[in-house]
Amino acid sequence: MFAEVEPVETCGAAEAAQQVMRKRKTTVRKGNAAVNREDDGCKPQGEWVAHVLRIRSAQDKTAFAELFRHFAPRVKAFLIKSGSTPSQAEECTQEVMATLWHKAHLFDPSRASVATWVYTIARNRRIDLLRKERRPEPEELTWGPEAEPDQADIVSLQQETAHLREALKALPEAQRELIEKAYFGDLSHREIAAQTGLPLGTIKSRIRLALDRLRHAMK
Amino acid sequence: MSNEIKHHLTDELLMAYSAGTLPEAFNLMVATHLSLCDTCRAQAESYDALGGCMLQDAPDMVDLADDALDATLALIAGGAAPDLPASPSCDVLPAPLRDYVGGGVSDIKWKPVGMGVKQAILPTSAGASARLLFIPAGAAMPDHGHKGMELTMVLQGAFSDEIDRFARGDIEIADEDLEHMPVADISADCICLAVTDAPLKFNSLIPKLVQPFLRI
Ligand SMILES: [Zn+2]
């Protein structure tokens, strides 16, 4: 994760990131026990994977209710921080959570954690709601008819995400705060500069420093 | 497919795409590049993962209405919104662009701008604009004066300037400091996607970037 995108440069991290996205699942799979077994210290990541798979394969409303109780208050807070009114955020959160149910068959645990997946759905809905804009998404990757991710890919992706999460928690407050503003405040670096009174150069170097630390932590 | 792409998106643009802070035209550019470039796609997914971690560990949570779960289950019972029909494939335009053109390369509604050069403005929101450019083989690109930041990505053919040669998938990032004279390769007509934040306002959404090509 977080390899520098420099022309003609490959490093271990870039390869690792590419490995994570090597395959893409097109069908439901069985036997996800390994996902839960492996994520010591970050149990929820794996738990939520199993929840989504239960929604997908068995329309499991109990699993959905648990997922809802965990993520809906976070999504609502995210939308309010990004500028929604509380009533807009309430309605939008319900739509995001319903989308999660309807798109459960598209969730790929070898490409994203459940939190990442929820984040992308909420972000796209926010753009739709607050800006009334379309959100262009990249073309779907096709890997041929029977390409399914193997357990090793799922486990490594979920573990990497757990590492990233720990690394993010370990960041100095000032750096973490800036990243949070960039993601949750719907603010460009320039707007963060205006809001915090810090020079743009300082904002950029703090964000760069934070990303460097995360990259380092991911090695 | 992406192995030969030499000129990529910057980290700053990839992060902003993931955070959802770019104007629509720049989102279109990023989505189009990611469709052709696995390296940048993996990066973008890493930035999404960062967003996921932030969401997971956000210090604040806001309670939902008491009936929120029931209301959501009712929404679910109402069924999913129908998927938009996928546009037919096209060797030149990746899917995000086909959605904006309303078809493939033969459906682009070109308008001549002189010297055989043609353009087609794509419908995006205010704040930045996107257009497709057609430059006949061997011809020079029109002077499109970089007032703000402009990204140009090659979709067909190639062009060269003082910086380098740019082929399918390559992005040139230019701001007002760049003076160059791009010329299309003689072997094929060149089609590019160009987006700029210049005409409407001074750069409120796009961070001004260090020009990556200066670091090569
Ligand atoms: Zn790239």
Image: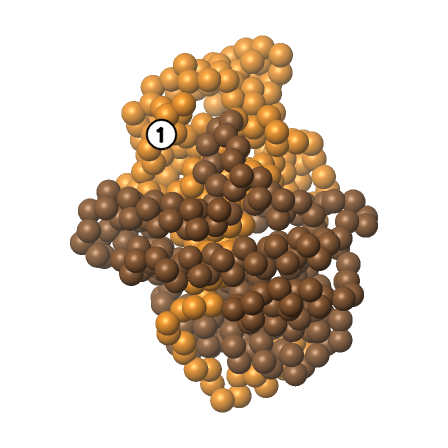
Q: Nearer the viewer, residue B180 or B16?
A: B16
Q: Where on the picture, by quarter, is residue B39?
A: top right
Question: Residue lying farthest bottom?
Answer: B66
Q: Is residue A10 visible?
A: yes
Which residue corresponds to mark 1?
B211
Q: Could you tell me which residue is drawn at 60 percent across and 55 percent down?
A: A157
- For mark 1, does the 10 Å Cα neighbourhood hold few (<14), some (14 to 19), or many (20 or more) residues? some
Name the tint of chain B in the rendering.
orange
Residue drawn at (52%, 61%) of the image = A162
Outermost residue to the right: A146
Q: Is residue A179 above or below residue A96?
A: above
Residue, x 73% and y 42% (percent of image)? B88
- Residue at the (60%, 81%) spot, across then down: A65
Q: Which chain is brown?
A: A
Establish if B122 lies above or below B113.
below
Q: Position of residue A122 (x, y in %)?
A: 50, 64
Q: Nearer the viewer, residue B82 or A207?
A: A207
SS of the residue under disc 1: loop
Locate residue A180, reporting x and y percent: 36, 60
Res B100 seen here: no
Seen in the image, is A60 located left or right of residue A68?
right
Classify residue A187 by image quadrant: bottom left
Q: Is residue B86 above or below residue B80?
A: above
Residue B185 drawn at (x, y percent):
56, 13
- Judging from the image, the colouring scheme is by chain
